[in-house]
């Protein structure tokens, strides 16, 4: 039987999707299910890992049925996952001992702050390449081990397993308690603060610093490798790849070579620039991360600008304020007015990530007057995404000295023409959406297909990349500069502490919660 | 009431009851209030769920009125929401056919293009959204017209002509729309611009109403066979894409 398709699993922050792609990288079937978001306390965000696994086991057969395909038609599964979301489960039963702690969760901010004051902190950041932030998974694992009664002893006794969502799903797909594979890929491991960013192995010094027993950790493997075959859901089908979702998007955009970059607009937004086999450290608030690794090849690195809140700000407008009934309707609402009416929203719901790295920042709306309507708020929400992109791109340009020629974009928000045009306007750069905006899934599909020989090499995949839409800048530069200044002013107002000039903020590169700055 | 159909009466009673109780009702409460057997009530609710007239936030949970009812009453689907749903399928259609794709909705007397995907040959192309096309002179518009029952040969005045091939007689067009309804797609060959053809099919909401048209447009040579008819293979791609978007609309509510 010819195996015509690859199946991508995109385990995202708000939903899980199963998508079938054919050999040309075209979407054949898509099934999606949202999972519940648990907010037990302000700043806490949790997912039920068992719910996600149950949903996946239902989505996959449904997607296959849509395409009138069976397991025999699927050459491989590739997994892309929300990064840094952490779960600990029992080896013997597969039962999580706590709900998964999601990447947006800030419960470990206090823990991170005290760790950052430790004399070894600078060494830790040097080893893992990451600033001290509750964003990364190590502090979440540590929190679970501390908070769940008996967890630490059980972890040391080898009864517990830790993983990000790809580890959890692969373990379940390959048999769970009956011999499931406990592994993570190198891109996900690079987001933990426990992996040495140069050797790409768990680091004894980092494990000691975070007080995490090695017994709970999965094995680190290349992103593109035939890990094993499923025994559940699609018995016999090979799992050929796992990548963090942003790395998957970079791969799906076929940014295989140094100098190629993309921005994915989802719950948060993430700019990744491939830096090749060279590890580039940033002086402007970006972080080095692993882009991908194919089995038998060296690790490829990327420079990343992470923005925590973009699409989730639109969700807040929908769920928190009830101004719209579905996310895409924000464009309809925003088009009821011609500009932002002087209103700016800095969505620092849980601090600001790149390039500011301020955990003390909280969201602000500036310029509120009686003139401002829901339409202006909708505009300000969309513009916040664009301004945050601008800040990250500026940092990237400062680090690499390379000016961006065009920005490759993907993700659900690229359906928003108003937003895409605004991004082109304020970056003063063409914005290009490739055919197949679902690059996260596509990247996972490509990677797994490469692992099983569905495609001969990465170069052959480039022929599948085509531009589907392009937005060209048309904003007056004086207006752009004035608006940017207003935005920057709003950002300084989001800081809990005294406002700092923008230049000084940018100088806090790689420094979070005052780690290295002595400020 | 001679000739009345009992199950429709009962379904209507359920809808009235849910409308009066916006806080949601359980199966037992509905059955008791209407004095119906639980199995009968469950069967009715299951059907009403399937067509989107009632909703349930969790399986086995209480019921409330569904968004499908609002659409039935003329509450139009937000075009930006539609674009968001159609995005992936439109990309795949462009990939399969090698042609540019458009999604259009009825907007007054025109078909308004709300989504445009470039032809995947990486040539220089301009994004052409928010463009209005004449309903009677493109495949998208014909699909939208066929989805309404109101259009007919009521007036004798001629429709605007764009090329020698534009259908300007309302009577001729009405006959063509009957055919569009029957076969489920529309074609247009050089009726709006010389040498350009289009093929479109309806996107339907969960109650089966046409809410938009999706299709391809491109040179007549590529879209049509030597006899000047739309190529069946392209028609099938367009139709299957339209079905996929329609299914997506029915199953995903956000």
Image (tube, coloured by chain):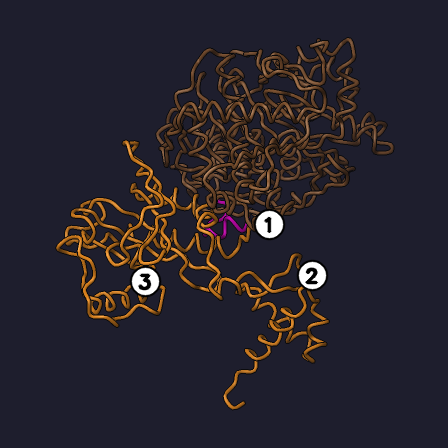
Chain colours: A brown, B orange
Q: Is mark 1 on a helix, strand or loop?
A: helix
Mark 2 neighbour class, 10 Å CA radius: few under 14, some 14 to 19, many 20 or more: few
Mark 2, chain letter?
Answer: B
Any mark on residue A261, and which? none
Q: Which chain is disc 3 placed on?
A: B
User: Could you say where residue A457 lies in the image, as x and y percent from the top left?
Assistant: 41, 25
The quadrant of the rendering that contains the N terminus of chain B is bottom right
Q: Name the residue under label 2.
A: B61
Q: Determine if residue A236 is in view.
A: no
Q: Residue at 43% x, 33% y: name it.
A: A454
Nearer-the-camera pick, A474 or B30: A474
Give the number of marks.
3
* In the image, farthest residue toward the left: B164
Give the secondary structure at mark 3.
Answer: helix
Residue at (20%, 47%) from the top-left corner? B196
Residue pointed to by mark 3: B145
Helix, strand or loop for the magenta stretch, by majority: helix
Could you tell me which residue is drawn at 77 percent across and 22 percent down?
A212
The front one of A273 and A404 is A404
Does the magenta segment cover residue A176? no
| Position in image of residue A380 (x %, y %) | 54, 36
Outermost residue toward the bottom?
B2
Magenta span of residues: A61-72
């Amino acid at each position: 039987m010819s195996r015509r398709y690859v199946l991508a699993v995109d385990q995202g922050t708000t939903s899980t999707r199963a998508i079938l792609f054919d050999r040309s990288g075209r979407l054949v079937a898509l099934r999606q299910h949202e999972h519940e978001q648990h907010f037990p306390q302000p700043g806490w965000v949790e997912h039920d890992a068992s719910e996600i696994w149950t949903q996946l086991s239902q989505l996959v057969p449904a997607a296959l049925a849509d395409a009138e395909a069976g397991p025999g038609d699927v050459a491989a599964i590739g997994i892309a996952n929300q990064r840094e979301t952490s779960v600990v489960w029992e080896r013997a039963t597969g039962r999580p001992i706590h709900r998964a702690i999601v990447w947006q969760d800030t419960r470990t901010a206090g823990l991170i702050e005290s760790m950052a004051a430790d004399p070894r902190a600078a060494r830790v950041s040097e080893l893992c390449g990451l600033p001290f932030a509750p964003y990364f998974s190590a502090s979440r694992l540590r929190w679970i081990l501390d908070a769940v009664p008996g967890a630490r002893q059980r972890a040391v006794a080898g009864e517990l397993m830790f993983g990000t969502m790809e580890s959890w799903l692969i373990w379940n797909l390959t048999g769970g308690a009956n011999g499931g594979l406990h592994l993570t890929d190198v891109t996900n491991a690079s987001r933990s603060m426990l992996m040495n960013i140069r050797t790409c192995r768990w680091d004894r010094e980092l494990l000691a610093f975070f007080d995490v027993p090695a017994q709970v950790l999965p094995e680190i493997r290349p992103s593109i490798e035939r890990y094993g075959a499923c025994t559940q859901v699609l018995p016999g089908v090979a799992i050929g790849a796992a990548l963090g979702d942003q790395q998957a998007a970079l791969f799906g955009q076929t940014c295989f070579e140094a100098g190629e970059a993309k921005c994915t607009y989802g719950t948060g937004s993430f700019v990744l620039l491939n830096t090749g086999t060279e590890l580039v450290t940033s002086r402007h608030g970006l972080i080095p991360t692993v882009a991908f690794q194919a089995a038998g090849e060296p690790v490829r690195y990327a420079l990343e600008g992470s923005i925590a809140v973009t699409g989730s700000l639109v969700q807040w407008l929908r769920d928190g304020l009830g101004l719209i009934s579905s996310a895409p309707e924000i464009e309809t609402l925003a088009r009821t007015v011609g500009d932002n009416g002087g209103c700016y929203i800095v969505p620092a719901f849980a601090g600001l990530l790149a390039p500011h790295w301020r955990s003390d920042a909280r969201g602000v709306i500036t310029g509120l007057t009686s003139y401002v309507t829901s339409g202006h708020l909708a505009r300000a929400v969309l513009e916040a995404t664009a301004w945050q992109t601008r800040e990250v791109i500026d940092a990237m340009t400062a680090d690499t000295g390379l000016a961006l020629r065009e920005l490759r974009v993907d993700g659900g928000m690229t359906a928003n023409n108003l937003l895409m045009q605004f991004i082109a306007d304020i970056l003063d750069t063409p914005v290009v959406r490739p055919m197949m905006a679902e690059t996260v899934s596509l990247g996972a599909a490509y990677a797994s297909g490469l692992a099983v020989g569905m495609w001969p090499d990465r170069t052959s995949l480039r022929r599948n990349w085509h531009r589907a839409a392009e937005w060209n800048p048309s904003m007056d530069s004086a207006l752009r500069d004035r608006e940017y200044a207003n935005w920057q002013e709003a950002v300084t107002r989001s800081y809990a502490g005294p406002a700092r000039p923008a230049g000084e903020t940018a100088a806090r590169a790689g420094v979070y919660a005052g780690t290295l700055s002595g400020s | 009431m001679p000739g009345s159909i009992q199950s429709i009466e009962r379904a209507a009673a359920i809808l009235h009851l849910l409308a009066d109780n916006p806080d949601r009702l359980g199966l037992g409460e509905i059955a008791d209030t209407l004095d119906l057997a639980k199995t009968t009530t469950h069967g009715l609710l299951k059907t009403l769920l399937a067509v989107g007239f009632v909703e349930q936030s969790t399986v086995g949970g209480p019921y409330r009125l569904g968004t499908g009812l609002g659409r039935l009453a003329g509450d139009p689907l937000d075009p930006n929401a539609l674009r968001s749903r159609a995005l992936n399928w439109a990309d795949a259609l462009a990939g399969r056919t090698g042609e540019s794709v458009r999604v259009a909705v009825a907007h007054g007397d025109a078909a308004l293009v709300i989504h445009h995907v470039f032809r995947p040959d990486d040539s220089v192309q301009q994004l052409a959204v928010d463009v209005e096309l004449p309903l009677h002179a493109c495949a998208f518009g014909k699909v939208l017209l066929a989805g309404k029952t109101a259009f007919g040969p009521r007036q004798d005045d001629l429709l605007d002509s764009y090329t020698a091939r534009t259908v300007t007689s309302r009577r001729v067009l009405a006959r063509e729309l009957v055919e569009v309804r029957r076969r489920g797609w529309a074609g247009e060959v050089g009726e709006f611009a010389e040498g350009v053809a289009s093929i479109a099919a309806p996107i339907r909401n969960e109650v089966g109403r046409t809410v938009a048209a999706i299709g391809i447009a491109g040179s007549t040579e590529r879209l049509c066979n030597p006899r000047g008819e739309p190529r069946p293979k392209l028609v099938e791609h367009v139709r299957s894409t339209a079905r996929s978007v329609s299914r997506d609309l029915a199953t995903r509510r956000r």
